[in-house]
Amino acid sequence: MPRGLTKKPPRSTWRGQLVSRILFSIFKGEMRGGDRLIEEEMAMKLGVSRTPIREALGELASIGVIRIKPNHGAVVRPFGPKQLIEIYHIRRLLEVEATRLALKNIDPRELQEIRNETQRLADTDTHGKKWSEQALDLDERFHELLSKSAGSERLAQEIARYRALVMTVGDAVGNRLQAHEHNMAEHTAIIDHLLANQPDEAAAAMGRHIDRAAETGAEALGLVYSTGAKAES
């Protein structure tokens, strides 16, 4: 589970920690659709003021994970494989467009460096914890490079938001979404198209990459929910 709140971090850090903590609980099935999130109770339980909690709830509402009702407070929206696929669909729209636009601004040397590191990691025989951490770090660098090279700060911010959602789901289901071998092969294909000055082909490859991840994610989340339901029965 994500780390607990520290005693006196900056307010923005409080908000970020709260968002991650609430998302984790929802994706883990500890909070169900219809559950209320009461600011006063959360503030008392977590030892923070209501302000960062209100900001965190506003951020969660903006991505559709909770609903804020006037005079009723925040309510968790139902979440399962269907809702995860919807998140991936939005992420697909954003990242496919970012990939198409990235060629105008991307540094080919940095792109080639990521490709070389990806190939080196893929050729490694031992796939332990350290290998997985390196693969995840490389995955983040790859997606961040493309989003930041698209030439739109707002687009990059939205991609980061939806990617954070997906990563939190991965933590909740035991990182079964991090199919690193598939990711590295798909990243290499995207990079090769970009290096060959083929933005449309790169964008199409990104679309296939996210489609595959969505299918894997929905399957993993469905397994977690079905296992939880059996345990409760």
Image (cartoon, rainbow, N blue to C red):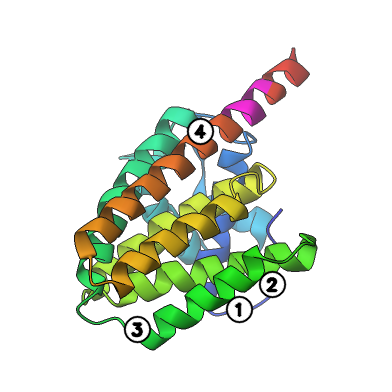
Q: Tag 4 or tag 2, which sits nearer the N-term?
A: 2
Q: Where in the figure is residue 54, as x and y percent of width and height?
A: 43, 58
According to the picture, the residue beneath numbered tag 4 turns out to be 218
Which residue is depicted at the point 71% across and 53% down?
1
Per the rendered image, the range of residues in magenta is 222-226
Alpha carbon distance from label 1 to label 4: 34 Å
Cβ atoms at labels 1 and 3 below 8 Å apart: no
* Residue corresponding to mark 2: 6
Which badge, 1 or 4, is on the more N-terminal residue? 1
Mark 4 closeness class: few <14, some 14–19, many ≥20 residues within 10 Å: many
The residue labelled by disc 1 is: 9
Discs 3/4, front: 3
Identify the element where label 3 is drawn.
helix
Q: Position of residue 232 (x, y in %)?
A: 74, 18
Nearer to us of marks 1 and 3 is: 3
Determine whether label 3 and label 4 are within 8 Å by CB: no
Along the line of sight, the residue nearer the viewer: 165 or 49 = 165
